[in-house]
Amino acid sequence: MKRTFFVAAAVLAASLSGQSAFAQTLKTVKDRGVLSCGVSQGLPGFSAPDDKGNWTGLDVDVCRAIAAVVFNDPTKVKFVPLSAKDRFTALQSGEIDVLSRNTTWTVSRDTSLGVNFTGITYFDGQGFLVKKALKVNSALELNGASICVQTGTTNEQNVADYFKSNNMKYEIIAFGTADETVKAYESGRCDVFTSDISQLYAERLKLSNPADHVVLPEVISKEPLGPLVRHGDDQWFDIVKWTLFAMINAEELGVTQKNVDEMAKSTKPEMKRVFGTDGNLGEQLGLTKDWVIRIVKAVGNYGEAFDRNVGAGSKLGIARGLNQLWNKGGIQYAPPIR
Amino acid sequence: MTTDGRKPPSQFVFKLRRALGGQAGWAGFVFQIVFVAALIWIGYEIFANARANLQAQRIASGFGFLWQTAGFGVSQTLIPYAETDTYARVFLVGLLNTLLVSIIGIVLASIIGFIVGIGRLSPNWLVARIAGGYVELVRNLPLLFQILFWYLAVLGALPGPRQSISLFDEVFLNNRGLVVPKPLAQNGLTAFLIALLAAVLISTALRVYARRALFQRGQVVTIWPYVIALLIGLPLTAALVFGAPLMLEIPRLKGFNFSGGLRVVPEFVALTLALSTYTGAFIAENVRAGIQSVHKGQREAGASLGLSHGATLRLIVVPQAMRVILPPLTNQYLNLTKNSSLAVAIGYPDLFSVFAGTTMSQTGQAIEIIAITMGVYLLISLVTSAVMSFYGWRLNRSLGT
């Protein structure tokens, strides 16, 4: 609430300060000595502080990987928790360098907000969480239901579309933050809590009795989530984009946090390009030759980050599904490093 | 030797100089023009620069977005609204919701404030202590906390729609709000309203007559039995002759929720309760200060005229206290309106939530939307204080000062 005004004022101030402030994000970040990364206000698995106050999660690991390629130190990140409705303004104003906050890639966001999406960290879709006691088995039985949603999300519009195209009535109650939304759902104000399915599983963990709630089978939308940067700085755009691609490529090549030093000695031409022992791909990006090694040492490859944060190795236990690599039955795919 | 008196400056120049704030002479005048020109130039630069930079960053700008389809739902709308309506309509919906909660909040806060403020000065020990305790408790807790308290603790404790607390199976209370029968207009409504209007007009005329009789001839005319007979009798006759003015649509539980009837959403109830009890505590202190500012000689004078405690308060103390109460009261009204923007925390769709919240994050046009929102809150506040100033002006006039 207050933040919106602050951020809007910052946009105004930034607009006044002239163009140059936005052009060289890499230099700005290096001069500052720390990467400023916009994350959620606490979504387990994606970005949430643990009991010691360290941020963890899949989105957080993307930030740490970027810090690793820039500073060779994944801890040099300042995490800025943002609500859904404030996130874009924070990026536009330059308060953050990159927004890695389970944000859906859509054409309107890509074209009218002055931002560029760099890739997809998680292929998601929107679903519904209901109490088991309601004995609802399908989203099509939700006619007349009250629905809690977080404001400023694609979910708010998707649910309107879904109910309209199925000729069902509904009452929507939109809250400022995810926590308020979940609290209202738990207090019984709404029959349904709707969000991206990964988020439903994550928020369900916070409920007092998770087993009493069930995620309905319908997936009503495509929600490709990924990090985004400000429009107008192609170098920084490339760095963020290829940091994510490097994580995915590392998994495909079988490079892990454990074996990365071993693999770096490889004499295969492909491996030599990736690890910078041959050519200067890293330097072309404005980074160092060992950029991929830095990423994998810091957060591991994409699969490791996925398992640790949201997959089998985490409390969420979400199956890889669509997020499995393209050659293993999923659709996660990155252009090659060459 | 004679001296010519200096020619007085022409009326226009004199007025202009006074408007510009001094007798500094032409040098000062020129300086002020330069200063204003510089201000305008800075304003223009801010505008032009912001525009150029927004374009360079490809952030959409301009007010065209107002006519795009909003595509999201709103839980409480005073005017018909569908997802296919425009952002301009969303703005209107939000504005009306803000006005609704502000106006009802102001009325309730004033009632609470006057009762508690007078209660604090009551000679009754218990009443004074209860009123004092209320003020100290409520005004010293953060407002956001109180809003969440009413929303989650009080209304959250209500049962679900299927276990509603019901009254005669017509009024239902549950965690989806208060559902009451909805009045539907019938044929007799027009006649009924005309009869009611006539009754009110005749009663007003009677009151004017009675006051005149009192002030000019010193004659006491009792009119209240006639007024009551008019106000009840006329509309009742109209209803008997032309048929019932309204029919009630009884709400019925259907599926997840009630269909039919009129529903007051809990977000609205929680916000109104929190705002009016909170602001009421501040108004109570204003009222107490105002009453205490009236010299006790005035009370004694009232008592010596044989007026009762209540009549002294009503006819002598409160009218004089109002002069002191009014300026801080205006402040409280303005605060209440502005505080209503905390609604977003409990999902009440006020202007700040649906326009400066959802619409802003969907269109990304922060500058335009924040500018419109600020302008609207400013306008609401200015109108409120204009109304209060007018009331103050009338009050002072009637007190003869």
Image: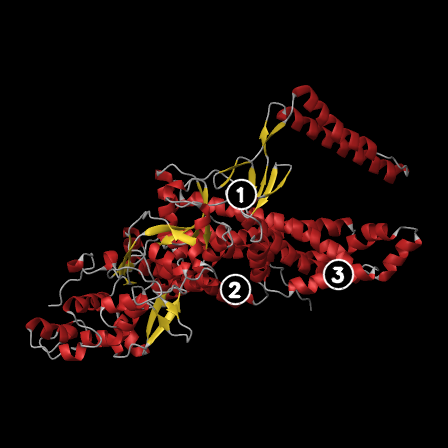
Return the residue nearer the eye: A74 or B91.
A74
In the rendered image, which quarter is residue A288 located in?
bottom left
Mark 2 element type: helix
The amino acid pointed to by label 3 is Ile
Say if mark 2 contacts mark 3, CB within 8 Å.
no
The amino acid pointed to by label 1 is Arg
Mark 3 element type: helix
Query: Horizontal placement of A43 versus B264: left or right?
Result: left
Residue drawn at (27%, 65%), measured in percent from left and top?
Answer: A306
Query: Which residue in the protein does label 1 denote?
Result: B162
For marks 2 and 1, the one nearer the N-term is 2
Above-or-below relation of A31 to B75: below
Query: Horizontal placement of A122 versus B300: left or right?
Result: left
Which part of the image, by quadrant, shows the C terminus of chain A? Answer: bottom left
In the rendered image, which quarter is residue A246 located in?
bottom left
Front position among marks 2 and 1: 1
Task: Please state the horizontal and vertical placement of residue B350, each as a whole percent of the image.
Answer: 51, 50
Return the residue nearer the eye: A142 or B88.
A142
How far is disc 1 from disc 3 in space, using C-alphas? 38 Å
As drawn, the label of residue B130 is 3
In the rendered image, which quarter is residue A337 located in?
bottom left
Query: Which residue in the protein does label 2 denote?
Result: B29
Query: Horizontal placement of A330 versus B72: left or right?
Result: left
For marks 2 and 3, the one nearer the N-term is 2
The amino acid pointed to by label 2 is Phe
Q: Is residue B13 visible?
A: no
Q: Chain of mark 3?
A: B
Task: Please state the horizontal and vertical placement of residue A283, each as a whole percent of the image.
Answer: 16, 75
